[in-house]
């Protein structure tokens, strides 16, 4: 056992047992769960308690940006610890969080000027939904007859906006959320543009098709949106969507121009646009924010995951000045946003988020990314040639690789075979930690990954896939 593995053999056994006995893991069938204990990290690598090294191929659930244990991020946390770890932001402030809000306004699309902090992405989405709803109730230009009618949200099929009840109300990944239907409000759903038509996906994955059974092109989805806006524009509070890529839906990449067109339509009909950049923000698509690719400024922007470079829980909901103004008034008006989270705006998280934004500049991360992204594109071609790999979708430093029984017909594996999960598990013995979405293997490493490290990740992914699907066709 390597010298750094301080945990004794005996206590490791206990830890494995206690993990299975007491820790209820997210999105995990605990009856089948096999512990893997990560002890430390270094750059893009993670090390388990036995000293095995893995590439962090999912960026620790899509949030790590500059690698693990970056000296400057570590120092930012300890420097802030030397002052204070946490004070409330309910009616109180602190220099670190103020500075972060200012920086976020500077780096985000023009027009977004107000920052509401929360602790996780789902909460940032909940805040966005409530802000949009309350805004319409209080907006000065609202005609009295419309005032209580704007209660509806429009979302895309296969959308993912988090796991709290409001967020799953606008979510569309039915295999995760259908059973909670009785607890959530109904959003109007329009088809994801660019999905193949077909039956609904099985409850635990399979390549995605449009659950409505109708393939929609971008223009079909847009004309559906316009019909909705014409028919019920005064009942719709907002459209919410993930710009460019629906990540948890299976790395579904929208056709170019779709986002721009949705912005134009929502503006024309006076409907708010909420963009959820929790997965795609902070460089993931090659720009700081995905909406920059199409010069789009939303009315409300949700940020999370990469905000703190994957160090600490923090999320933010940014809004325009127009929205904010509708919440101003005297105490007696009751127009304030009566919503908040205990750890919203936490200083330790704010300190590391600020330092992460400085690193983007000092390490010229966005300037370096195009080379890494096109390298990924070339390397993915190797995977495309494997006999059981179907569609591959990539945007920036994120990719989804569909596993199929038959390449020509994109026939999915029976979902009970859990091919995606097994391929990711197999990749571990080749030195990579990956996560799947159904039978889509996802590649989403820290943005700091080098091209050599990317080659290692692709090789491990290919080895994982071939070891469970076999090298030959059916
Ligand atoms: C992860 C994610 C969320 C939810 O964030 P949590 O921090 O897990 O609550 C919301 N929207 C998108 C697009 C996400 O990828």
Image (spheres, helix red, strand yellow):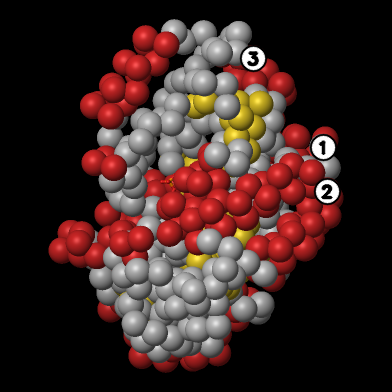
In the picture provided, is 354 more to the left or to the right than 188? Answer: right
Tell me if residue 354 comes above or below residue 120 in the rendering: above
Alpha carbons under labels 2 and 1: distance apart: 8 Å
Determine the residue positioned at 46% across, 10% down. 7
Tell me if residue 43 comes above or below residue 287 in the rendering: above
Determine the residue positioned at 52% across, 21% down. 50
Residue 118, percent from left and from top:
44, 40
- Name the residue tied to disc 3: 79
- Name the residue tied to disc 1: 363
Residue 123, percent from left and from top:
39, 46
Give the number of the mark in front: 3 or 1. Answer: 1
Specify the quadrant that holds the N terminus: top right
Near mark 2 (Cα within 10 A), the count class, few <14, some 14-19 or many ≥20, is some
The quarter of the displayed image where residue 258 is located: bottom right
Q: Is residue 265 visible?
A: no
Secondary element type, mark 1: loop
Secondary element type, mark 3: helix
User: Most extreme residue toward the left, as rendered?
Assistant: 182
Secondary element type, mark 2: helix
In the picture provided, is 197 more to the left or to the right than 268? Answer: left
Residue 305, percent from left and from top:
53, 44
| Earlier residue among tags 3 and 1 | 3
Near mark 1 (Cα within 10 A), the count class, few <14, some 14-19 or many ≥20, is few
Alpha carbons under labels 2 and 3: distance apart: 28 Å
| Earlier residue among tags 2 and 1 | 1
Contact? badges 2 and 1 (CB < 8 Å): yes
| Earlier residue among tags 2 and 3 | 3
Tell me if residue 255 comes above or below residue 297 in the rendering: below
Determine the residue positioned at 24% across, 41% down. 31
- Name the residue tied to disc 2: 368
Disc 2 within 8 angstroms of ligand 1 (CB): no
Q: Which mark is residue 470?
A: none
């Amino acid at each position: 056992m390597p010298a750094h593995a301080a945990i004794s053999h005996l206590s490791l056994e206990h830890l494995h047992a206690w993990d299975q006995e007491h820790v209820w893991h997210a999105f995990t069938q605990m009856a089948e769960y096999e512990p893997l204990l990560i002890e430390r990290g270094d750059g893009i690598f993670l090390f388990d308690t036995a000293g095995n090294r893995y590439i962090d191929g999912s960026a620790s659930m899509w949030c790590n940006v500059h690698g693990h244990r970056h000296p400057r991020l570590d120092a930012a946390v300890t420097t802030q610890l030397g002052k204070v770890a946490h004070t409330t932001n309910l009616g109180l402030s602190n220099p670190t969080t103020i500075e972060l809000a200012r920086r976020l306004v500077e780096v985000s699309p023009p027009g977004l000027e107000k920052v509401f902090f929360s602790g996780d992405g789902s909460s940032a989405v909940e805040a966005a939904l409530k802000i949009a709803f309350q805004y319409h109730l209080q907006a000065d230009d609202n005609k009295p007859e419309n005032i209580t009618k704007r209660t509806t949200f429009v979302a895309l099929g296969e959308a993912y906006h988090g796991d709290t009840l409001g967020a799953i109300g606008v979510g569309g990944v039915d295999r995760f959320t259908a059973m909670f239907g009785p607890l959530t409000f109904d959003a109007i759903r329009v088809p994801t543009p660019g999905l193949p038509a077909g039956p609904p996906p099985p409850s635990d994955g399979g390549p995605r098709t449009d659950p409505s059974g109708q393939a929609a092109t971008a223009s079909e989805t847009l004309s559906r949106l316009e019909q909705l806006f014409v028919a019920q524009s005064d009942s719709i509070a907002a459209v919410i969507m993930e710009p460019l890529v629906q990540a948890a839906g299976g790395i579904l990449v929208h056709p170019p121009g779709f986002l721009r067109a949705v912005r134009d339509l929502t503006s024309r009909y006076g409907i708010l646009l909420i963009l959820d950049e929790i997965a795609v923000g902070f460089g993931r698509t090659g720009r700081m924010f995905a909406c920059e690719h199409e010069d789009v400024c939303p009315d409300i922007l949700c940020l999370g995951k990469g905000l703190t470079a994957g160090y600490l829980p923090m999320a933010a909901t940014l809004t325009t000045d127009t929205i904010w103004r509708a919440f101003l008034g005297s105490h007696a008006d009751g127009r304030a946003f009566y919503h908040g989270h205990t750890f919203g705006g936490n200083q330790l998280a704010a300190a590391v988020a600020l330092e992460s934004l400085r690193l983007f500049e000092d390490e010229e991360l966005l300037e370096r990314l195009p080379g890494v992204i096109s390298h990924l594109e070339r390397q993915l071609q190797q995977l495309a040639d494997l006999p059981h790999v179907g569609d591959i979708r990539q945007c920036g430093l994120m990719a989804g690789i569909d596993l199929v029984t038959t390449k020509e017909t994109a026939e999915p594996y029976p979902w009970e075979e859990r091919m995606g999960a097994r391929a990711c598990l197999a990749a571990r013995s080749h030195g990579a930690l990956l996560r799947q979405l159904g039978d889509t293997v996802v590649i989403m490493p820290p943005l700091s990954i080098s091209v050599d490290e990317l080659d290692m990740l692709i090789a491990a992914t290919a080895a994982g896939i071939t070891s469970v699907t076999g090298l030959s066709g059916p």
